[in-house]
DNA sequence: ATAAGGAGATCGCCTAAAAAA
DNA sequence: GTTTTTTAGGCGATCTCCTTA
């Protein structure tokens, strides 16, 4: 067992290990990084000394010598309305992915100085690049970073705009909603409605456009009526009000496509209140497959983003630092639960 | 305006600035860190050169030389049930606080190897210490870190257990619930009920104990009946079921003290469904003053944790690294909204 | 004597080339 | 001639002397 260390004691360096093992510093370094060029006996001796001294590689010195920053920055926003824990889970997965690549995820608090903070970290050799989530149309952060030559990847991009000169990764929101519409029509529904946030984030617009496009393509005229396409305010009570308006209208839809799991939850709650059985009475789909959808006990059919793949790509692009700009549009997946029978 | 830089170009060092300004490297360093000992004319010249070359201090080299780690680790859990975005907001605030102290918040993904990851970062001079949230009784992470001599602060601690040898910061959950009970009794309520999670997290137990203690002290016997103290499962549907059981019981409470804002939200939704006006019909309080309470449109009276102060203390303890173990129990604050009239 | 600036060593690690086995 | 190990040198910033006006 390892003895507790006194605080403030200098941590052992390679030189200490070298002395202890009776070899040169270089041999210790090689034993760690290129074990193949060190003889087995020496390697074992070095390893024993490292254990004895409880040696750890000094990551800062290593980073300096290799000119290889260890951190990846993540621009975290102050907070999101009606957060459904999707981003919460995603953040954890992203941190894990960074660790697998020998990096660490560092949060950059968003406020007035986030770009300056990125500059300091990037030019200070601390961060290899940045991940920028929650992209909206005309997001000024993207050109600001580009102009400064700071590597980054946006989580969110416009698939119909080839002109973006920066990397992005996103789920095909349009296609996701189309999956939901197709699923519902295949169940016999022809009176649909859409419930979501107004445009702002890129993904929000494409979720709405996906609905409009799918209904148009399938000739579902009535599902495109003004009262059938609802855009809500950010507060949860707004979602409930919109859901209620849909379900109590003169010509209520038999199925509701929601832009988020929170909207779907709102439909669930209002339907319960009105005595409408969800699934058989009114079908509803969500988006993101957050815990609200699968683990709230409601069983909400939802559209899953390939979280793991997204995290992998975001990190990979920053670590590899290829020259070509990458736009990665990923396939969503429909997760069917009891809210659509 | 700054010209865009070519990727891969070497970043200017102090030596470059020194050459450009016609001074020694040391003078540049002094101009940055101890401007008072450099003459004004020289200082200006150096500053102009720094601007011209777009110089940034290499944080890695600085960290190595000073043996001063720049990062503070945060052990982020995979996900929380019924997340109410409190932790979400808190994480952002914490990152901002770290930045104010010249540090950065690094996420350590929790899984099987989090302690090892902490070791690598701490002994690798990368992280000064760690913040451990979501503390449960007998949490093995705390002794594991202590034993290894790794500095950390827990966000969550047992105020009635003096024996903990580690730093912690927490809000006085008991007192918070007592504030809620007192508020409700002062409004004339004497038939209360409690709605929360079963024990597990330290704060969860003390929220419940706070309720039991307050009712006992005030002689509210009926509010301590088994059917009045509800512990729910983690899924949102469980919260709704418990709220329904309370509101539809033979002897329903006139006020419900909830351990989280999510529980209070559940009460709100069920009350609406039952046609009971919240506030006048049944009063309800939440906990954490998350966006659900204040920004959901419901107006839920809630108990606010002093978020800013907590973040400040957590970071301060790690940055100062005093020798004495600190246990900081902070005062909560009652935020009255329309859910209690 | 004081104030301003400079030369050299150092933090811990790794690359490249030379030396030893 | 190969395999193994060592000797220099330097990444970029800072600290400790030390020199010069």
Image (tube, coloured by chain):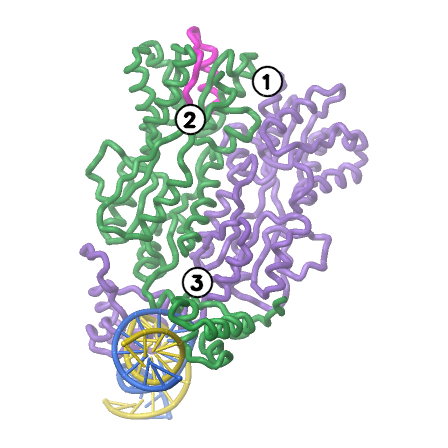
Chain colours: A green, B purple, C blue, D yellow
Q: Measuring 61% from the left and 31% from the top, which residue is drawn there? A: B263
Residue position marked by numbered label 1 in the rendering = B273
Residue position marked by numbered label 2 in the rendering = A334
* Chain bearing mark 2: A
- Residue B1 in view here: no
Q: Mark 3: which secondary structure?
A: loop
Label 2 vs label 1, nearer the camera? 2
Question: Which x, y percent locates residue A166?
Answer: 25, 44
Which residues are the magenta region? A238-258
* Chain bearing mark 1: B
Q: Measuring 62% from the left and 59% from the top, which residue is drawn there? A: B144
- Residue B36 in view here: yes
Image position of B175 (left or right of B317): right
Quadrant of the frame with the N terminus of chain A: bottom right
Do badges 2 and 1 share one subunit?
A: no
Residue position marked by numbered label 3 in the rendering = B70
Label 2 vs label 3, nearer the camera? 2
Name the quadrant containing residue B334: top right
Is residue B70 highlighted in magenta?
Answer: no
Q: Is residue A262 above or below residue A6?
A: above
Q: How many residues crowd around disc 1 within 10 Å: few (fewer than 14), some, or many (20 or more)? A: some
Is residue A251 highlighted in magenta?
Answer: yes
Image position of B160 (left or right of B4): right
Do badges 2 and 3 share one subunit?
A: no
């Amino acid at each position: 067992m390892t003895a507790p260390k006194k605080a403030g004691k200098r941590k052992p360096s390679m030189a200490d290990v070298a002395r202890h093992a009776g070899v040169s510093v270089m041999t210790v370094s090689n034993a760690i990084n290129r074990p193949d060029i060190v003889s087995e006996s020496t390697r074992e001796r070095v390893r024993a000394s490292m254990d004895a001294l409880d040696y750890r590689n000094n990551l800062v010195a290593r980073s300096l010598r290799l000119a290889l920053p260890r951190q990846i920055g993540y621009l975290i926003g102050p907070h999101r309305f009606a957060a459904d824990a999707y981003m919460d889970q995603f953040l954890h997965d992203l941190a894990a992915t960074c660790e697998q690549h020998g990096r660490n995820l560092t949060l950059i608090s968003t406020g007035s100085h986030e770009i300056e903070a990125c500059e300091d970290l990037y030019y200070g050799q601390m961060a290899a690049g940045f991940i920028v989530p929650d992209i909206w149309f005309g997001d000024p952060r993207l050109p600001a970073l580009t102009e400064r030559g700071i590597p980054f990847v946006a989580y969110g991009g416009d698939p119909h705009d080839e002109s973006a000169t920066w990397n992005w990764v996103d789920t095909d929101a349009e296609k996701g909603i189309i999956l939901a519409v197709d699923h519902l029509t295949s169940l016999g529904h022809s009176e649909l409605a859409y419930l979501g946030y107004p445009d702002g984030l890129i993904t929000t617009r494409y979720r709405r456009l996906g609905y409009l496009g799918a209904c148009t393509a399938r000739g579902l005229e009535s599902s495109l009526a003004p009262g059938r396409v609802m855009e809500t305010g950010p507060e949860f009570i707004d979602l409930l009000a919109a859901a209620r308006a849909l379900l109590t209208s003169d010509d209520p839809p038999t199925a509701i496509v929601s832009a988020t799991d929170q909207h779907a939850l709102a439909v669930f709650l209002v339907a319960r209140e009105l005595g409408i059985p969800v699934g058989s009475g009114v079908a509803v789909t969500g988006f993101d497959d957050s815990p609200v959808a699968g683990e709230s006990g409601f069983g909400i059919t939802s559209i899953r983003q390939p979280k793991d793949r997204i995290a992998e790509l975001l990190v990979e692009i920053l670590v590899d630092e290829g020259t070509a700009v990458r736009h990665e549009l990923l396939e969503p997946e429909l997760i069917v639960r009891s809210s659509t029978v």
